[in-house]
Image: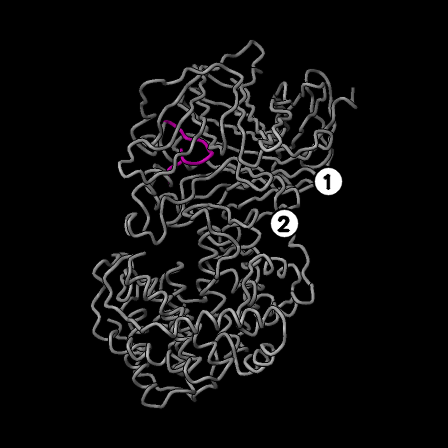
Amino acid sequence: MLVLTSLSAVQPIMAANHPNLVINQQDVAAMQQAITQPGAFQNAFKAKRTEVDAGLTQPIEVPVPVDAGGGYTHEKHKSNYQQMYDTGIIYQLTGEKKYATYVKNMLLQYAKLYPGLPLHPKRKSSNEGKLFWQGLNEAVWLMHTVQAYDFIYDALTPSERDLIETGAITPAVLFLSEQSPRTFNKVHNHGTWATAAVGMSGYVLGKPLWVERALYDLTLSKKGGFMRQLDELFSPDGYYNEGPYYQRYALMPFVTFAKAIEQNEPQRKIFQYRDGILLKAINTSVALSYNTLLFPLNDAIKSKAIDTIELVNGVAIAYGINSDPQLLDIAKQQHNILLTGDGLKVAQALDKGLQQPFAFTSALYRDGKQGDKGALVVMRQGSPTDQAMVFKATEQGLGHGHFDKLTWQFYDAGNEIISDYGAARFLNIEAKFGGGYLPENDSWAKQTVAHNTLVVDETSHFNGKVKTANKFHPRLHFFDPQQGLTIASASIDSAYEDVKFKRTQALINIEKRNAAFGFDIMQVTANKPHQYDLPVHYEGQLIDTSFSREASLTQLSTLGTKHGYQHLWLLAKANLAQDNNDNTLARVTWLNDNGRFYSYSTLVNTHSNHATQQQMLFTQLGANDPNMNLRQQQAFIHRVSATNHTYVSVIEPHGEYNPAKEYTLDATSKVAKLSHYQQAELEAVHISFTDGQQYLLAINQTEHAINSDTRSVININGVEYPFTGRAQLIEMNELN
């Protein structure tokens, strides 16, 4: 049996100069000079000092922990560590003893409280805490608290330091490490916070073994720890396995601990590790947003944006390293100047107007530590509020992942148009299930039908089993960003036992239509007949459909009994007619809050094998929800009973509704017809508009590499259409 040497028994190394974590003495000198000069940094200092001074008038309270997330004691300990941190930095900038005294007195109270604390009365079994209901919050507390201690270190007597270190910091370090080995050694954001807090404490208290264990796990085996997390949680493109929401959250310990490593041991070259993976991760976090809001993939709170404190820290630290003027564009939108050396660099650069627009471009973000486990594809038009499509062909994302292989979202004019629910959680609102994830997060938000992707036989991907889902990932076939046309294709054959589906999506700017259209081709193949559902969760008010609907007028029923279907009220349904040419068009039009209309047009019964029926089902979220935890959102579901089927659809932004000036323009779709053609590995979508314009989206689906000069010819009804590259939009009017 392995016996660990107590961390508290490790002999301290030579005491370092303080502060020595996120700021050093040179930073302090520069900041002290800056607060005497007009500018953004001085403004930030004055605002923070006013806030801190108000806090000093309040009595210090360090309550015995009682509440779960969002409760009084939980929030009080959170505000305490933030107040200690802020007060400590004001002490560094002013040298006024009252600030150091305040932090000291609070730390001494924690030193009395902490050693006798049992496990939290409302602890989470997956990661227990003492001050907080989970160890994750404990690590966040320690990371802030040890920085506050670092700020006032030189203002304390040796006996005061001993009381604080032995009563508060060392017990917290031991609890998060030796006493919580499963979390500490885990490759997960909880492990990142724990290792960062312990490692930073090691630098402040002069405990080198704390630092080494934080970097390489408790036994120094390199099976866990901070470096292993850097290796496994990020892809080579800086994409974080759990998705943008948790990437934003995990950035705080990653970049803060890395900054401390750089300050104390620059020879480790931490910001150069894995080809600069941390700097890539910061840029990727920003890029995975639309109109400032982060893409709500997996377990995500949809209100989180680029102005969160984690990204404020990340952007400032990154700018302090690379002076990228595009990061200043983001910093300007964050409206939050940090009182650090890096924050000073940002403030001075903004004062000089050095910012340049952040490049929101179409991009592929590979998933998996080697970049071979699928990818997230973002298709954009260039502006932060232009049309954008998000095509998710990533891994599961561990326990925070959703069963949503090959799902997608669509954005336009600043708003979400085709949406993702995100997480079912009211963060830190104790009245809603203690602020934690609601039961509906499992029963609805994670289930496949809650997303815009294929559901087979009303069963979620991988039968809703996380362990199974973590073993598989989609296969990315290609990604091709061109001027005015971006296209990607991916498939998966493991989500269901005998069903394979392949999805190809494109965002195409048709200049003569003055809009970008989203094209979607979903090909489903199986060994026997199944019920296929393809949901579209839309944001807005239903305006019109091209088919008649049978509405439920006096009584609602649920759409199903499990895998999320039990939460859907069936509002209306329609049996979709089809003609002999297999090119009937079914269209749904809605109005978004941005004042634009959107029409989703899809083919009916195209390339089906043994199709028995096709329906469009209109649903409202909220069934089997006794506590009314779910948001009332709406969807339409294209249901097909078949063995094989190809869904072919296009989303079309059009028109304008202006209630203030009382006018409406182009409220009806201009798409007149869709047709789909398949010729071996070549395929095409023919789209006709009501004014006679016709276009052909021609695609080469071959597996081998294709360059822009590769020439292909697809034969449609006896007419040959040549095209080059992976895909091309052909204006058929010109050819004819």
Compared with 412, 1 (above or below) is: below
Q: List the residue tagged with mark 1.
A: 708
Crowding at mark 1 (Cα within 10 Å: few <14, some 14-19, many 20+): few
Q: Position of residue 21 (x, y in %)?
A: 47, 76
- The reply, left or right, for residue 260 in relation to residue 81 is right
Tell me which segment is drawn in magenta. Answer: 446-457
Q: Point out the image quarter for the N terminus.
A: bottom left
The residue closer to the viewer here, 360 or 332, is 332
The residue located at (28%, 48%) in the rendering is 433
What's under tag 2, amino acid-wise?
Phe
The residue located at (44%, 54%) in the rendering is 246
Q: Earlier in the sequence, mark 1 or mark 2?
A: 2
Question: Is 29 part of what is drawn in magenta?
Answer: no
Q: List the residue tagged with mark 2.
A: 360
Q: Point out the image quarter for the C terminus.
A: top right
Label 2 SS: loop
